[in-house]
Amino acid sequence: MSGIVILNPYSNRWKAGKRVPEIIDALEELSLDCEVVQTQRPGHAIELAKQASREGRDPIIAAGGDGTIGEVINGLHHANPEGVLGPLGIIPFGTANDLVVNLGLPLDIVGSLQAVSGRATRRIDLGQVNDWVFDNNSAVGLEPVVTLYNIRMTWLRGVIRYLVAALRAIAAKPEYEMRIRWDDGEYEGLVSLVSVGNCPVTGGMFKMAPDADPTDGLLTFVYGHAPTHWKMLSLLPRTISGEYIHDPAIHQHHTRQLEITCSPGTPIQADGEIRAEDATTIRYRVLPARLDLYTP
């Protein structure tokens, strides 16, 4: 059966849909027999990927930003919840393209499809937060508050949008009473953020989980409490390099599972998309060696 390109035409500020002719030309040049199907609504990529997997379509390619890739992976997971997913190709059309950048995959259409044509693959872990599977990063507390501001600031573009959103979130100073339990530890007290990484970089520039490795069979998480606006602000530039984890207020660990109880409720973000806005119980687990990606 022919393959499918699941394209979110709204990615990159509605520019992705205009690039369908380029995708078709590259598919034909590389003799890849694929139908290009555009998503029509949020969640549609989940349905398309689930159906494509069950029909045995090959290859399956996600074209869009990190949110679109996440939906496609969740569709594959729905079709095969216990097995290895993919192989999956990616044509990145997002603002940050975090997964692609973290893994060093091609950023252009032709290079992305050449990777698919070459059929070489790389296997990585996935993470799961409650019932949602993520490939790059998830968080509760400050980081999804940043995501909420980022979603609303449609007048800015690129990495500067993430930076301004971070400054606005710091001004709001979210704070939670949490109990955090992981494989070999536990913490109870005030928390500003918990960031859980399968890969190191999120938001285009922030090394929130600097020691994360998507092939080690573990999730890397960071938690901490910044009691003042100034403390939060002083940590922000150090998140870009990842050096913030050396601050005494910040703690990084590796684990297979993580359980958080929280008051008040917190938003949850996964791969840049809000998955809950008022969660009081959050459960993470690693899905080791679960996704195959086409790679150069």
Image (spheres, rainbow, N blue to C red):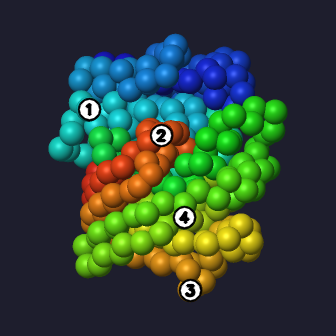
Give the image quarter of residue 180: bottom left
SS class of the residue under badge 4? loop
Q: Which mark is residue 277?
A: 2
Q: Residue at x 61, y 41 (%)?
A: 148
Looking at the image, can residue 199 be seen? no
Q: Residues within 10 Å of mark 2 (few under 14, many from 20)?
A: some
The amino acid type found where label 3 is placed reads Pro
Residues under labels 1 and 2: Cα distance? 23 Å
Looking at the image, can residue 285 be seen? yes
* Front-lying residue, 40 or 208: 208
Q: Residue at x 21, y 36 (%)?
A: 80
The amino acid type found where label 1 is placed reads His
Q: Residues within 10 Å of mark 3 (few under 14, many from 20)?
A: few
Say which residue label 4 marks. 192
Judged by depth in the image, the label closer to the viewer, 4 or 1, is 4
Residues under labels 2 and 3: Cα distance? 29 Å
Label 1 with label 2: CB-CB less than 8 Å: no
Residues under labels 4 and 1: Cα distance? 33 Å
Q: Earlier in the sequence, mark 4 or mark 3?
A: 4
x then y, percent, for residue 155: 81, 33
Q: Residues within 10 Å of mark 1 (few under 14, many from 20)?
A: some
Q: Which mark is residue 78?
A: 1
Residues under labels 1 and 3: Cα distance? 41 Å
SS class of the residue under badge 1? helix
Say which residue label 3 marks. 248
